[in-house]
Amino acid sequence: MSTIEEKIKYLGKDKFVKFSNTDEFPELTTETKDFLANHGVYSNDKGYPYLTTSGVLKKHNDNLIEIGTGVVGDPFCINIETDEVVGYELESHETHVINKSIVKYVETLYALYYHSDEIEGKETLGEYWKNHKKYAQSLRTMLEEVEPNIMEYEAWYVQVHEMELGVI
């Protein structure tokens, strides 16, 4: 099992943006503040989940601290009541859980990219287009090792489901 530092290195340390103003948000847990200040968040507008950040936390509302935005401009936030990483839909004002914590978010990204590079990319389960359901199950298993109820989170469910269908 890799450490969080090894997972960050695998994802590309240069793609992580550290946050400079975590001390301005005492409502965040110490673990979350330390992680954001010392490791940051994966910021890449060209790879799923297309989160980009400037490295400056912003208060979104009473319960949400914005860490960045997605491809369509919807904020990615930390829910201060639960410590979960959530997506906030600007149009509907609804939130959906992405991961239980910022650490789980990075670990999930690692599993997704590792699976893409080392399992799908090397076709370890056979030719992808003939075996996409096997690859989907493999990805699901890896993601569930990080978050046991990962299929309840839309952002990750979509990745597995589209693979099952052979769409991606």
Image (tube, rainbow, N blue to C red):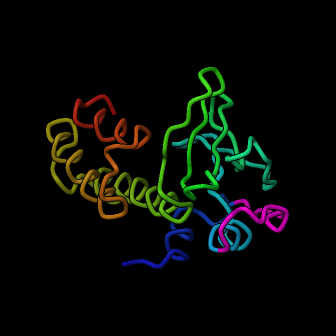
Q: Is residue 163 left or right of residue 81?
A: left
Q: Is residue 22 placed above or below 160 in the rendered structure? A: below
Residue 63: percent from left, percent from top: 67, 47
For the record, the magenta segment spans 17-30
Q: Is residue 52 placed above or below 141 in the rendered structure? A: above
Q: Quadrant of residue 73?
A: top right
Q: Quadrant of residue 114?
A: bottom left
Q: Which residue is painted at 51% across and 67% down in the image?
A: 10
Q: Is residue 151 left or right of residue 125?
A: right
Q: Main secondary structure of the magenta part?
A: loop
Q: In this view, does 149 lie to the left or right of 124?
A: right
Residue 20: percent from left, percent from top: 83, 64
Residue extending furthest top?
91
Asked whether 8 falls inside the magenta stretch, the response is: no
Q: Is residue 12 placed above or below 161 in the rendered structure? A: below
From the viewer's side, name the closer residue of 103 and 30.
30
Asked whether 27 falls inside the magenta stretch, the response is: yes
Residue 65: percent from left, percent from top: 71, 50
From the viewer's side, name the closer residue of 58 and 19.
58
Q: How many marks?
A: 0
Q: Which residue is painted at 56% across and 68% down in the image?
A: 8
